[in-house]
Every structure is written in structure tokens, then in C-alpha cells.
Amino acid sequence: MVSSSSSSSSTPPNNNSKFPSSSSHNLFPPSAKIGTSSTLRHGEFVIALGSPLSLHNSCTMGIVSNPNRSIRDIILISPTSSYSSSSSSSSKATQTTYLPTMEMTYIQTDASINIGNSGGPLINLDGYIVGMNTLKHPYGEGVGFALRIDDVMDVLGCFYREHYN
């Protein structure tokens, strides 16, 4: 039987503070570390985090299908002739006019990326962020894309130098 006066904790509680002491609790949640996308390989396992369809704290796993997919390779129209016609205003082809105009390289993955995952991290199995979930192919299942973290960090660096130096 354990006496009520003994304590299993080596740090007594601090009743004079609104916040827990940093020695007994973490004040900040753990954070992921920025990795590199330059060493990604075909078939490497990755995890996509996000809130697809407002389902918070979701996690999906897949592989890197192609670590260097050019935007020119991503065709966002259906290969069938019924969608390639521009005569119909309800054609699915009219919904795919949002291709970026600048040359971008993406990580193609089969980890499920849906509406709401955009902006979430793509993480390798070592726990490093290697990409930023961006888009899914509208006519394919399991065909998602993430911006390469090296490119994201370059853009953030340029933004920082432009606005904070």
C-alpha cells in the first residue's frame, strides 16, 4: 500500500502558477523537422497528413511514384473524347483550367491526397517533411502531388529576404 504523503513524481506540483512547470510537462507539442526532397527515390514510403473533407488529424500512407514529376507531365483532362470537347458547358474539361503557368516539379504519390490535405506535410518514414501536399489528379484514383520541400523552402527564403531584410 502506498502512503498518501509519498509522491511518485520527482517534481512537486507548482500551485502558484497558471502554467505547468516545463520540467514536468512539455509546453509546446513536438514538431517535425524539415528534410530534403532531393534524395527521394521511387518506391519510398511516405505519409500524408491533413484534414481531408474536414476530417481533422487524418493520416494516409503510400509510396513515392515519381519524385520529380514535371507539371508538363500532369494532364488534368480525361483521355476520353467526351471530356475533351469544349462545346458542352457542363464538360469536366472546363473545370481543369487551373494549371500553374510556371514550371514546377512535384512529388507524385499514391498516398491519398484529397480536398483539405493541401498544405499539409508529406513526411518520410524517418519523420522528416519532404513535401507539401498540393493537389490530386481529378480523374485518377491514388494519383496525388506534393510540392518538393526544397522548392518550398527556396520560395520561403526569397519571401523572407524580400520582406524582412
Image (cartoon, rainbow, N blue to C red):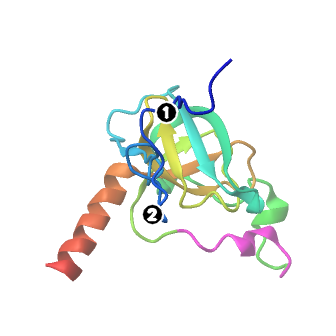
Q: Secondary structure at mark 2?
A: loop
Q: Residue at x 24, y 72 (%)?
A: 160
Magenta span contains residue 56: no
Q: Is residue 135 above or below residue 2?
A: below
In the image, 19 versus 16, the foreground residue is: 16
Q: Residues within 10 Å of mark 2 (few under 14, many from 20)?
A: few
Q: Is residue 88 above or below residue 119?
A: below
- Residue 90 falls in which quadrant of the image? bottom right
- Please give the residue where the numbered disc 2 appears in the rendered image: 17
Q: Quadrant of the C terminus?
A: bottom left
- Residue 50 falls in which quadrant of the image? bottom right
The image position of residue 76, as x and y in percent, is 65, 60
- Please give the residue where the numbered disc 1 appears in the rendered image: 9
Q: Secondary structure at mark 1?
A: loop
The image position of residue 107, as x and y in percent, is 48, 45
Magenta span contains residue 92: yes
Q: Residue at x 56, y 53 (%)?
A: 74
In the image, 78 versus 127, the foreground residue is: 127
Q: Could you tell me the amino acid type at mark 2?
A: Ser
Query: What residue span does the magenta drawing correspond to?
Result: 89-99
Q: Residue at x 42, y 32 (%)?
A: 10
Q: Residues within 10 Å of mark 1 (few under 14, many from 20)?
A: few
The image position of residue 34, as x and y in percent, is 35, 46
Q: Quadrant of the N terminus?
A: top right
In the image, 56 versus 25, the foreground residue is: 25
The image position of residue 57, as x and y in percent, is 67, 51
